[in-house]
Structure formats: C-alpha cells, structure tokens
Amino acid sequence: MRILGLNSSPKGKASQTRRLVQAVLDGAAAKGAETEYIDLRKYTIEYCIGCRKCFATGKCVFDDDYAPLLEKMLAADGMVWGSPNYSFCVNAPMKALIDRMADVIHCQYFDGKYCAAVCTAGRDHAIITRFLANNFNDLGAYVTGTAGALVTEGEAAVARAEILSFSLGQALADDIVSQRPYFDQHVAIDANRLDFQAKIRQYKEQWPYQYEYWEKRGWG
Ligand SMILES: Cc1cc2nc3c(=O)[nH]c(=O)nc-3n(C[C@H](O)[C@H](O)[C@H](O)COP(=O)(O)O)c2cc1C
C-alpha cells in the first residue's frame, strides 16, 4: 500500500501544514503503508492555458514536472494533500496543480483511491479542506476525512491537529485495506462520471483520446 503526501506550502521545514501532512503519513505508516512526502515547491508546474490538448491527446503541451508527479500520484493507493489558506483558497502552487488535472478528472483516473486533506490557516481551515475534498471526489477518489488547525490559536492547536491527522492517516490506510464503500460519495462520483462521459461523447471528434479511453475502459 503506497500513500503519497503532498504539501504546497512554500515554507519547507518551517511549514505548519507540513506537520499535518507528515502526521497523516506517520499514521498510515503505523498501519503498514509505504509513504512518500512531496514538497510541491520543488516541482515546476506551469499554469494551465486551457488549450484542451490533453483532452485530445492525453498529454499536456508543457514539458515540466507535472507528468512525473502525476505518475507518482497514479501509482499511489492513497494520498494526502495539504495547503495553507491563502486568501480564502488553496495557495497558488496547489491551484496550479489541480488546474492541470482536467484530463484526470474527465477520465476519473483517481477512481478507487482514498484521499485525505489537511490545512493550517489563520482564520479558516475548513474552507480549504472542503475545497480539496471536493476536488478529490471530482477526480474520482473517496475522501476518508480532513483535519486542520488555526495557527492563531497557538502551538497547542497545531499539536492537537497533528494527533488527529495521525488518526486520519490510520483511517486512510484502513480504508485502503478494507476498500470501504462511502455510499454518498459513490453516488456523487457516479453522477459526475456520467456528466463527463456525456460531454466526451458530445465532443468525440475534438477529444479522441478521452473518447477512446472510455471506449476501452467501458462507459458503465
Ligand atoms: C499570503 C498569505 C495569505 C493568507 N491568507 C489567509 C486567509 O485568507 N485566511 C486564513 O485563514 N489564513 C490566511 N493566511 C495564514 C496562513 O494560512 C497560515 O499562516 C498557515 O498556517 C500557513 O501555513 P504554512 O506554514 O504551512 O505555510 C495567509 C498567509 C499568507 C502568507
């Protein structure tokens, strides 16, 4: 069982979000998972230019660190993504990564994966973990849970969230082993898939890669 932890804070070892991502990985490792931490600031991820070439070819027009990072994500059974709250949203590196994943969303490549989201913030962490959780579902993955801390509440608040994050990592690993069905998420993911498939059928000529992908995989 492989679990990947990704942190988009630019602060490296000083990142508070890093503590929560690492705690999730430690919890998963305690349940036998092989884990890897990724510092997103070390990856060059260009901004999506909305050309939709990936819909047609399955490949992005940019030759940067996105493709190798995607490969790592696809090889993982589970993931935890962490971002600080910047201006009521994930910070720019995390947004740049998610924007590049439109093809992954259309093809539901995260189907069968289990994920978790963490955030540290000054005033609101839930807005960010909700955003990340929504994106995981959009990518086809189940969300085991989320954790967050307000750094403005002091060290004790972050330490408490670290303990919660450790439990979240254990739950994430348990979900992967048991392939836990989340009924409500399953219904939402299924509805998304049907929407994407309808679009892809409509744009069959323009998006041959995605059309052929679903033809091969089966539309059901
Ligand atoms: C540029 C910037 C913008 C921020 N905007 C918000 C915000 O809108 N809401 C909030 O709750 N916290 C905000 N914060 C606080 C950070 O989310 C908080 O310090 C977080 O713990 C940083 O995480 P890190 O140490 O992992 O980088 C902002 C911080 C910075 C540097």
Image (tube, rainbow, N blue to C red):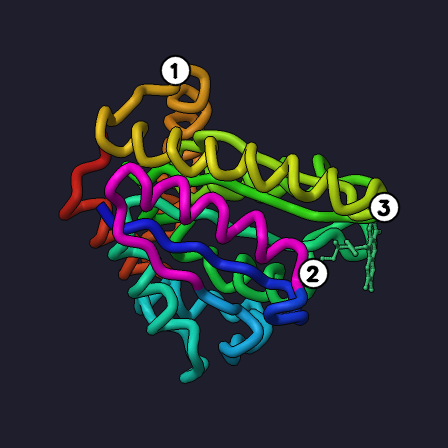
Query: Where is residue 174 drawn, in percent x and y?
Result: 30, 29
| Amino acid type indicated by mark 2 | Asn
Q: What separation in Å lies between label 1 and label 3 (alpha carbons)?
A: 36 Å
Quadrant position of residue 87: bottom right
Relative horizontal placement of residue 1, taking residue 108 as reference (left or right): left
Q: Earlier in the sequence, mark 1 or mark 2?
A: 2
Q: Quadrant of the N terminus?
A: top left
Neighbour class for label 3 at 10 Å: few (<14), some, many (≥20)?
A: few
Q: Quadrant of the C terminus?
A: top left
Q: Are marks 1 and 3 in contact (CB under 8 Å)?
A: no
**Of circles 1 and 3, which is in front?**
3
- Residue wearing tag 1: 183
Residue 91 image label: 2
Q: Are marks 3 and 2 in contact (CB under 8 Å)?
A: no
**Of circles 3 and 2, which is in front?**
3
Query: Where is residue 127 drawn, in percent x and y?
Result: 72, 38
Residue 143 image label: none
Q: Earlier in the sequence, mark 1 or mark 3?
A: 3
The correct choice, above or below, for 172 with respect to 132 in the image is above
Q: Which residues are magenta?
A: 15-37
> Does the magenta segment cover residue 27?
yes
Residue at disc 1, secondary structure: helix
Relative horizontal placement of residue 160, taking residue 178 as reference (left or right): right
Residue 152 image label: 3
| Amino acid type indicated by mark 3 | Thr
Residue drawn at x 46%, y 31% as measured from the top left: 167
Residue at disc 3, secondary structure: helix
Residue drawn at x 42%, y 72% as measured from the top left: 66
Residue drawn at x 44%, y 82% as measured from the top left: 64
Mark 2 vs ligand 1: CB under 8 Å?
yes
Quadrant position of residue 175: top left
